[in-house]
Structures are given as C-alpha cells and as structure tokens.
Image (spheres, helix red, strand yellow):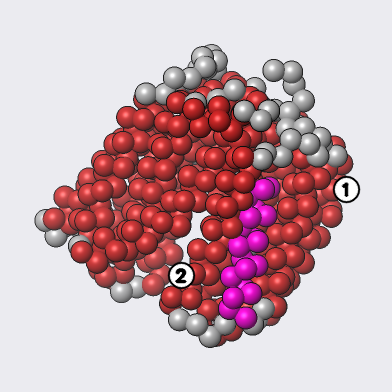
Amino acid sequence: MSDQPLLLRQHRPFLAFWLARVCTASGFQMLTVAIGWHLYQLTGNVLDLGLVGLVEFAPRVLFMLHTGHVADRYDRRRVAALCQSAQALIALALVIGSSTDNVSRELIFILAFLLGSTRSFEMPATQALLPNVVPSALFPRAVAASASAMQSATIVAPAVGGFLYALGSTWVYGPTVLLYVTACLLTLSLKVRPQHPQQGRASLDSLLAGIRFIRSRPDILGAISLDLFAVLLGGATALLPVFAKDILLTGPWGLGLLRSAPAVGALLMSLWLARFPVERNVGRVMFTAVGIFGVATIAFGLSTSFWFSLAVLAVLGAADMISMVIRGAFVQLETPDEMRGRVSAVNGLFIGASNQLGEFESGLTAHWFGTAPAVVLGGVGTLLVTGVWIKLFPTLAGRDHMHTRAR
C-alpha cells in the first residue's frame, strides 16, 4: 500500500479529472463573485443577492430525478463535458453583455437559472464518473484528492475573481470561459473503464429507483441523512458577518479570514487523507468526525477571541472533510455502477438542502435566541443527532471497511 500515493499521482486519467474539477470549481466561484457584485451594482437591492442563490438552487430540486437518470443512461464523460460547454456559453453571454453594456437584472436571473441547471446535471455525472476513472483500491484517496481541488478553488478563486472584477466585469467573465472550455477538453480526454448504462426508456419507476435503492441500504441512508441533519443544525457560516462585526469586533478583512478558515482546514485534511486514507473503523471515524464538528461549532459560538475562532473554524472544516470523504467513498463503492448517477443526484439534493436550509435555520434561531446561543444550540443539536444516528444505524457505526463487496 505504500506505493499507492505515487500511483495516484501518476494516474493520468485521474490527473485530467482533477484538473477539470479545478477548472470548473474555479470558474463557478469566480462567476458567483462577479454575478453578485454585478447584480448589486445594477439594483442596490440586498434581497436580489439572496434570490440569485435561490434561483441557482431551484433546478437541483426541479430536475433531481432526471439528472441522475441522465448520468446512468448516457456516457458520463459526454454529459459532464456538455454541461461544462453550456457553462462556458453562459460566461460568454456575460462577456458579450458586459462589453456592450447590456446586462440587466432579468438577464442575470435567467443565466443564474441556466447555470444552476447545468451544474445540476454535471454534479451526479461527475461524481458517478470517478469510480470509472480510478481502481477501487485508490478510490478513497481519489475522493480526498478530488475534494482538495474544490477546496483550493473555494479559497483562491473568489479572491482572484474579486481582483479581476476591479479591472472590469469582462476581465472576470472572459477567463471563466477559458476555464470551462479547458475542463470540457480534459473531460472528453478521459480514459475510463466501460460504463454499464441503464437500458430501457425513462419512466417514473426508473427515475425513483435511486431513492428506493438508498432506502434499501441502511448504511447509505444513515450516512446521507446524518450529513443532512448535522450540517442543517450545525451550520454557523451564515452568521459569520454578525460574529465578525458585533462579537469579534473585526472588519471586512476579518470576515474574509473567517470565511476562508473552514476551507483551509478542509483543504489540509483532504491532502492528508489523500496520502493517508482511512482504511479501518470507517464508521467510528466518521461519527467521531461529526462529533468534533459539533464540538467545534459550540466552541465557535462561545468564543470572543478572533484567533481562537479562526482555529476552531479550521478544525470544523477539517472534521467535515473527514466525514465527507468517508461518506463519498463508501456510498459510491457500495452502489452498483448503473445506479451511481441517480444515487449521486439524491445525495446532491440532500447536501444542497442542508446548506440552504441550514442558513435559514441559523438565521431563524439567531432571531429567536440571539446569535451566539443559536450557534451553540446548533452544535448541541449536531451532537444529539450523532448519538441518535449511532443507535438508529448500528451497522454504519460499526462499519470497518469502505466497501463490503468483492472487487
């Protein structure tokens, strides 16, 4: 096993996959920053910023059953590449609109919906594609390394997008076109193991098969639902502006550091897991990581020190990454190839819902009980959910290996 990290670095299809992920994630982060600034300059309405996020999330709900079915029925490389090409065209429309001064509020909302739609189809296709790119023995490392691409983009790309936007909006939208085109070419170049596409015509029964499969596998259901409720209750990031201004008494620079701290912790942990993957006691490690996530949330809610808050947010991000990598690896490995797209679509909806609803839950409880008490209560709720899930899903808690099927 000592030579596996070297094998992953030398695995050319995975390197192409990883670079494509970097390009798409960076392009999306830069687009998000630019669209937000552009819209606020046009309207000056804070509500519009929230509506953009809602418009981008809506397609994930509207097309959930279809996105997974498409990933299972058609060549996943071509599905992902087509989505990346569509995102390049969206960015190109913004380039043309900005250069001719024809970008309106309505156009931004239309393009945001299209962007959310293409990402809804790209996500399950990309997630289900990775097991066909690398051998199963390297898959946990590949999941961690792939996550590092996302975290790197989350840290670097928004800052780059903000800097370029200061030079003019076209300076942001132009490079994103190149990023998406590069991702498309890399995806099409992938050499993968043969996919076993679903046969037959689309039907309600086949569309719902992913949900039925998850319900029939207690370990998969437990892992996905644990993430949903843990993030739903423990999400403190929506309240970071309040902590920065009123509790930690720092400025916008401090808010930027607070927002990046979880991503920094997650990135460092993903690099560690790519080198030293969790191979035994995966259930115990995953539940422990979720517990640490809850404890870190409580510590952040009680903190009045800026630097201590940064530290616990980094721990929070690292713990969340451990849980995410273990869950992502074993769910994919335990799912038959012909079902991976639909299962990934359901999982993606759970993740998106937990983030969106988590922000709403944090804002609501902060309004009722105050900012710090709301975060502390959320952390306590995460710990309670962890304990309840250990009782409800004992085989998941006692799980030793990533997968049980012989490969």
In percent of width and height, residue 114 lies at 35, 45
Packing grade of label 1 (10 A; few <14, some 14-19, many >=20) is few
Residue situated in front as seen by the camera: 277 or 372: 277
Q: Amino acid at mark 1?
A: Lys
Packing grade of label 2 (10 A; few <14, some 14-19, many >=20) is some
Which-is-in-front pick, marks 2 and 1? 2
**Residue 284 can be seen, yes or no:** yes
Q: Amino acid at mark 2?
A: Gly
Left or right of 256, for residue 198: right
Q: Which residues are magenta?
A: 305-323
Q: Earlier in the sequence, mark 2 or mark 1?
A: 2
Q: Distance of mark 2 from mark 1, alpha carbons?
A: 39 Å
In percent of width and height, residue 206 lies at 59, 24
Name which residue lies at 60% across and 62% down: 314
Name which residue lies at 49% across and 26% down: 11
The total number of labels drawn is 2
Q: Quadrant of residue 293?
A: bottom right
Q: Which mark is residue 391?
A: 1
Residue situated in front as seen by the camera: 331 or 4: 4
Q: What secondary structure is marked by label 2?
A: helix
Label 2 sits on residue = 256
Q: Quadrant of residue 101?
A: bottom left
> Does the magenta stretch mainly form a helix, a strand or a loop?
helix
